[in-house]
Amino acid sequence: MSPIEQLGQWVKESDNIVFFGGAGVSTESGIPDFRSVDGLYHQEYDYPPETILSHTFYMQNTPEFYRFYRNKMLCLDAKPNAAHKKLAELEAAGKLKAVITQNIDGLHQAAGSKAVFELHGSVHRNYCQTCGKLFDASYILKSEGCPHCDSCGGSVKPDVVLYEEGLDDETVRQAIYYISNAKLLIVGGTSLAVYPAAGLVDYYRGDRLALINRSTTSLDQRSSLRIEGKIGEVLSGIIL
């Protein structure tokens, strides 16, 4: 039995699956992976992306933050790929209980997934830091310089977790709950290098941990099944 066939068998046998994913889930939709060979971290800017996407930089160099953010983070034309669609299909079939994602692109919801926990927030939620009014991503994209609230004039900030900022407590609590209770945990499209998000996988106590990634991860030795390849291609091979 091939690794993909083995994964398919586990999926058929389980009605309590949790998926934990990272940037690799969205690369097949044309959204760059920060840490891949051709990702954002290997391109040249005045500052490294991890510096620009920090709380300190946002506070001290807000116009430059938004210049980078609009150019590189708002991929609003991206569409869900085979991985997003298969996960939504598994949820609709009653098998997948939660998607826990490090991505901020909203593609899981666009594919139809309902139980999505976004560890790092979403580009589709933006809020006025003065009055709390909410704005969509297109408002940020169409604005110039630092976006301001059209009601009170306050600064509008994306609801994304920047470096130096903490994760949302309730989102983390839900993620831990679903991971710790899962029968089958599928980890895909992530190198498990970003903490504290990657550390949440340690709460899994089951014996069916499947890893799908194009490179090695820190969990390779612990995994029950490891598949090297594009996650969309792997998941689309699962027949319910």
Image (tube, grey):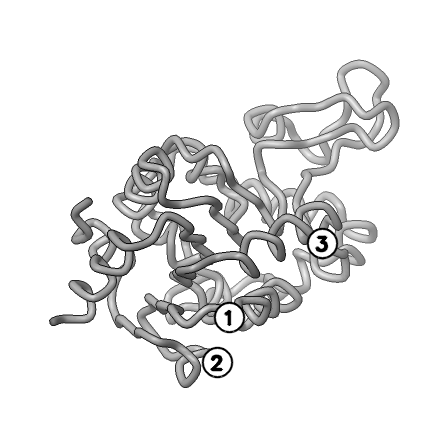
Nearer-N-terminus badge (1/2): 1
Q: Quadrant of the C terminus?
A: top left
Tell me how far mark 3 sits from mark 1, CA to CA.
Answer: 16 Å
Nearer-N-terminus badge (3/1): 3
Viewer-proximal residue among 89 and 192: 89
Q: Which mark is residue 218?
A: 2
Tell me how far mark 2 sits from mark 3, CA to CA.
Answer: 21 Å
State the residue at coordinates (36%, 69%): 211
Nearer-N-terminus badge (2/3): 3
Residue farthest toward the top in the current orientation of the protein: 151
Estimate the x, y position of residue 43 in percent, counting from the top left: 47, 65
> Callout 2: few (<14), some (14-19), or many (20+) C-alpha neighbours within 10 Å?
few
Estimate the x, y position of residue 41 in percent, counting from the top left: 50, 67
Estimate the x, y position of residue 173 in percent, counting from the top left: 69, 52
In the displayed structure, would residue 85 be above or below residue 55?
Answer: above
For the residue labelled by badge 3, is the local secondary structure a helix, a strand or a loop?
loop
State the residue at coordinates (66%, 66%): 196
Q: Look at label 3 and name its amino acid.
A: Leu
Circles 1, 2 touching at the beta carbon (< 8 Å): yes
For the residue labelled by badge 1, is the local secondary structure a helix, a strand or a loop?
loop
Which image quarter: residue 54? bottom right
Task: Identify the residue under disc 3.
Answer: 167
Q: Look at label 1 and name its amino acid.
A: Leu
State the residue at coordinates (57%, 32%): 124
Estimate the x, y position of residue 158 in percent, counting from the top left: 68, 38
State the residue at coordinates (59%, 61%): 49
